[in-house]
Amino acid sequence: MSEINNQQELEKMIENAVSKAVKKSVRKSEWIKTALDWLFKIALVVALYFGYQQIKPKNPEVNDIEEYDVTLENNGIFGFTAVDFEDVILGHATRQQLLIVDEQEVSVASTITDTGLFNLSIFTKVLNETIYGVGEYTIDLTKIKKSDIEFDEENYTITIHVPYPTLHSVKFEPDKTKIGDTEKGWLAFGEIKLTPEQTQKFETEAVEKLTERLNDKECFETAARFAKLTAYEVYQPLVNSISPAYKVEIVVDEPSTN
């Protein structure tokens, strides 16, 4: 009888121990589940936060660009207007009113005549020469007005109309004069010797002949081509100082008919 009671007590103890172990295991499982739920929620919040940081609008940053001299703003094309370029282009005229665009060397055949005694041909001597000179052509930058500057935002182009070149000065170069043969009357002897007054007169006439040659249409057409190139070399760097995005085009106006 006592053995049966002992066996029942042992079974009861085992049952109680198993029951406590099961209950403890269940409580542990519930705690782990709760902890995992919280970890999932925290991970979700963190993921949503960083995702928002990636897609939220950002304030634009203005970076310094070496080629640009001004800060670009969202105000029209690159933030520039025609006035920005006009001020620089027209302001240059106050520093350099005349722009030398071309220098041309020309030569002209000339003669010096010494009529000799009684102005008779038999005493006359004629010296043939080739004289040389240089003509300087310029354009007057002060004649450029605002209406001569065209601002093309769509094609990033600044078109500048410049005046037709003018013959600014003529320089006679006597050192380059080539002396030819002297034609003499049959009673004319010796070489031609000019007095100071005759020399001055000859130089004046030389400049007149050189000027006439330099006023030829072909000389001005050459000067106009160089005017376009020279004006571009002057104004493209000025425009670049405002914005390298813009290019300069030069138009040489037709010569005045007056």
Image (cartoon, helix red, strand yellow):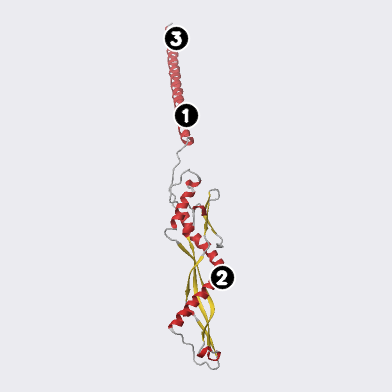
The amino acid type of the residue labelled 1 equals Leu
Crowd class of label 1 (few under 14; some 14 to 19; many from 20; radius 10 Å): few
Q: Which residue is label 2 attached to?
A: 216
> Could you give the CA–CA distance between mark 1 and mark 3, rounded to whole angstroms?
54 Å
Foreground disc of the pair 2, 1? 2
Q: Quadrant of the C terminus?
A: bottom right
Task: Name which of mark 3 and mark 2 comes first in the sequence.
Answer: 3
The amino acid type of the residue labelled 2 equals Asp
> Could you give the CA–CA distance between mark 2 and mark 1, rounded to whole angstroms?
87 Å
Disc 1 element? helix
Instruction: Measuring from the top left, give residue 30's x and y in whole percent.
Output: 45, 20
Disc 2 element? loop
Q: In the current view of this chain or complex, which residue is farthest to the top? A: 1
Q: Is residue 231 above or below residue 208?
A: above
Q: Which residue is label 1 attached to?
A: 44
Q: Is residue 29 above or below residue 144?
A: above
> Could you give the CA–CA distance between mark 3 and mark 2, rounded to whole angstroms?
140 Å
Q: Quadrant of the N terminus?
A: top left
Mark number, residue 241: none
Instruction: Measuring from the top left, give residue 92's x and y in whole percent.
Output: 44, 57
Task: Name which of mark 2 and mark 1 comes first in the sequence.
Answer: 1
- Residue located at (47% from left, 52% from top): 86
Q: Please say whether residue 38 is visible from this viewpoint.
A: yes
The amino acid type of the residue labelled 3 equals Gln
Q: Which residue is label 3 attached to?
A: 8
State the count of labels: 3
Foreground disc of the pair 3, 2? 2
- Residue located at (51% from left, 46% from top): 77
Crowd class of label 2 (few under 14; some 14 to 19; many from 20; radius 10 Å): few
